[in-house]
Amino acid sequence: MTERIILYGTPTCPMVLPISGILRRAKAPYVYVDISKDADAKEIVRTINNGNESVPTLVFPDKTTLTEPSRSELQAKLLDYGFEDPGGTMMDAWKENWLFTFLGVVFLIFAGAAQNWMLAAIGLAFLAYPPVSYKLKL
């Protein structure tokens, strides 16, 4: 396949980084288009999503689309196209889900300062979510 997948997103969308990571690991050729800087792209996303600016929105070479796909939906689509299984490591999970990682670290820092086991448990839960979601392919 020589055509690229188009990934429409915005810099503020927390799901764009995990989706682009999956595409990168699957070695799927793609191009990222920031709809906050491209009015034509914004209109394309609105057309695909019934007037909503839902991102990430992916357009595949056969013109099929996925909007805000789960990890397992995107993996299945990429495998159907013949790309590699986009697996991932624990570090990939933490990098691509930076918000959960950041919150987990912050909670652990405050837990240490306050010597509060509840804050520590919350921090560990935030840090556990990304790798667990990768393992379960959520």
Image (cartoon, grey):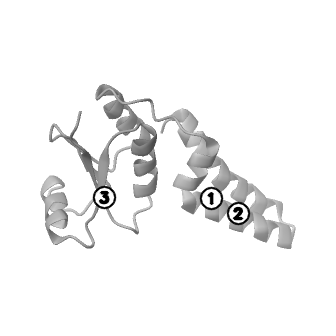
For residue 93, the mark is none
Q: Amino acid at mark 2?
A: Val
Q: Look at the picture and state if 8 lies above or below 60.
A: below
- Residue 126 is situated, as x and y percent measured from the top left of the image, at 64, 55
Q: CA distance from mark 1 to mark 2?
A: 6 Å
- Residue 38 is situated, as x and y percent measured from the top left of the image, at 21, 70
Residue positioned most to the front:
2
Judge the density around disc 1: few (<14), some (14-19), many (≥20) Cα neighbours within 10 Å. many
Question: Can the viewer see residue 99?
Answer: yes
Badge 1 vs badge 2, beta-carbon distance below 8 Å: yes
Judge the density around disc 3: few (<14), some (14-19), many (≥20) Cα neighbours within 10 Å. many
In the displayed structure, does residue 14 sit left or right of residue 54?
A: right
Q: Amino acid at mark 3?
A: Val
Q: Amino acid at mark 1?
A: Thr
In the displayed structure, does residue 46 sit left or right of residue 94?
A: left
Q: Which residue is mark 2?
A: 105
Q: Secondary structure at mark 1?
A: helix
Q: Which residue is mark 1?
A: 101
- Residue 89 is situated, as x and y percent measured from the top left of the image, at 60, 40
Identified at 32% across, 43% down, the residue is 29
Identified at 57% across, 35% down, the residue is 135
Question: Can the viewer see residue 15?
Answer: no
Q: Which residue is mark 3?
A: 55
Q: CA distance from mark 1 to mark 3?
A: 21 Å
Q: Look at the picture and state if 50 lies above or below 5.
A: below
Q: Secondary structure at mark 2?
A: helix
In the displayed structure, does residue 34 sit left or right of residue 44?
A: right
In the displayed structure, does residue 15 sit left or right of residue 129?
A: left
Q: Secondary structure at mark 3?
A: loop
